[in-house]
Amino acid sequence: MPMDGLTLHFMTRELAGALVPGRIDRISQPEADEILLQIRCGGNNHTLLLSASAGCARAHLTHVRKGNPLQPPMFCMLLRKHLTGGRIKAIRQVSGDRILEIDIEHLTELGDTAGKTLICEFMGKHSNLILTNSDGKIIDAARHVTSQISRVREVLPGLPYVLPPMQDRLDFGSPDPEALEARLRGCGGPLWKALGTQIVGLSRQTAQELAFRAAGSTDARAEDFPASLIARRVCETLSAIDGEAKPMLLLAESGEPIDVVAFPYRSLAGLPWRGCESLSRGMDEFYRARDNYERISQKSAALRHILRNNIERCEKKLALQEEAIANAARMEEYRLCGELLTAGAGQIRKGDKSARVINYYDPEMKEILIPLDEKLSPTQNAQRYFKLYQKARSARDLAADQKEKTLQELRYLENQAYNLEECDTEAELNEIRAELEKQGYVGANRNRSKMKQLPPSRPLHFVSSRGIDILVGKNNLQNDKLTQSAGALETWLHAKDMPGSHVIIVSEAPDRQTLYEAALLAARYSRGASGSQVPVDYTLRKYVKKPGGAKPGFVIYTHQKTLFVTPDEESMKGIKAVRSD
């Protein structure tokens, strides 16, 4: 559920109740468009998250810990200067829209009382965090908006703060049946769309819920119902909506949250759900995975582009090398021509354009026609064919050698592309980037001093249904460390002939069920995760070797056996994941 006006209405009440008149103790900025305020209120410590992320713009209390850059961004330093130690005097929503204002009172360096307002605009790609003084002038903003970016409104330090253009819509906080009826009269098309264009701050989901409550269907059409009936029912719903406050998470069949709502949506009554103690708790849980996925996707986009370009380059090079090998198939023909011309040189004269000679290698002793260079003598023509033979053979050997190197590079790049897809923490992303930088695919990071200090990433940890630990690497660095640190008699697994993770069973004598479950994990964390009967090789760790000079993550192994497994949800039920905080 996006932070629409109705959701922000409920969140505003929740934040005001928890944070007013709290004291701001600390301010951090883990992302360019995200602020965290540490607030002490009523003997409790709270962390307020304010995000202007295009896909996850929102405000709520959070319990998720986030790392900070080594050097605070300028906007963060400015907020610390103006707001640290300040008291939150009020939190309010502006006209039912997706704008939250936080009034803060603090002491200046001279000891005078001053007021500031932190304005949070949750408007998709136009979302922003803006600090203004008591005169309504902008002190600074997370995103500067110039006249080149927007001809409607500039957001720059020193300019007066101007609200975003307010469309001519009704405020759901003061529903007026007559006013809504007048606006709906004559509207056609989907009812939810008509409501969304007439009432401020409604997302598509909320507009569909109002349509469902007013007309019994999210697909109802405006022209099929009297405007007076729809207006009355919608206004009744909005008037009573505060009494329905019941934050809940909507769940997928797997139990994962797929949405969070501030009150029960009757149009989604068929979905499984779980109640939350607060809307902030629900948003914290829902956005934890989604926000992290979006952040990682944004930050890995450049690496994906680099890997894709290099994979395409390798594929083109491989095609040329295979063509060179195919062309070298004529080398035996060149050798035969040279030998037959040498044997029949006495019957050939200089100036002949071709020579018809007997093929002594043919059991039937048939004649063949050999093209000649009329400027050369018979012996020179024979030598020319021998040189073509040597050249073709050298080209074949060189192409074969280059092809093997290209295949190794292609396997490495495809494996890195897979690792990038599976990456879900910034530490893992930094490790992949550092490795690609070391391998020469990525330029040196000039902002390394500003990068977050993150502990090394760790392999995934699972426990089999028999209680045995299984470790799964998620990138080349983890795979190398995991394999090198495993005991010689522990079992090592890897999906056969495809990018995937190294898997270690932390036992010298695993039972058959544990071996099967480890093979399921090796298949799940490989390119074959969505397939069936995925081949997984397993052997003792002592038979796994890393050749000298090999790229990270590359090993060779012997004495392996192969299991064929299908990593579906049912098969993996007995495997428990162990969280590593």
Image: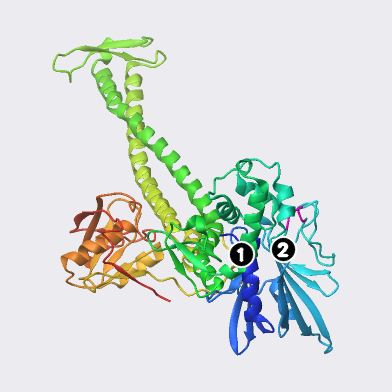
Of helix, strand and loop, which mostly describes the magenta segment? loop
Circles 2 and 1: CB distance less than 8 Å? Answer: no
| Residue nearer the viewer, 483 or 264 | 264
The residue closer to the viewer here, 460 or 62, is 62
The foreground one among 226 and 365 is: 226
Quadrant position of the N terminus in the picture: bottom right
Residue type at the position of mark 1: Thr
> Which residue occupies the foreground of this view, 16 or 243?
243
Question: What is the quadrant of residue 511 in the picture?
Answer: bottom left
Q: Quadrant of residue 403?
A: top left
Q: Which residue is drawn at 36% across and 46% down?
A: 407
Residue 200 is a magenta residue: no
Q: What stretch is highlighted in magenta?
A: 166-170
Residue 490's disc is none
Residue 261 higher or lower than 580, as above or below = above
List x then y, in percent, for residue 73: 68, 71
Query: How many numbered markers are drawn?
Result: 2
Q: In this view, does 321 lie to the left or right of 193?
A: left
Q: Is residue 410 visible to the viewer in this orientation of the structure?
A: yes
Q: Residue type at mark 2?
A: Ser
Nearest-to-viewer mark from 2 and 1: 2
Residue 318 drawn at (x, y percent): 40, 40
x then y, percent, for residue 244: 56, 68
Left or right, 116 with respect to 127, comes to right
SS at badge 1: helix
Q: In which quarter of the image is the C terminus?
A: bottom left
Who's the residue at 56% across and 45% down the image?
220
Q: How far apart are marks 2 and 1 (CA)?
A: 16 Å
The residue at which mark 1 appears reads as 7
Residue 14 position in % (x across, y down): 61, 75
- Residue at left 59%, top 53%? 214
Q: In which quarter of the image is residue 302?
A: bottom right
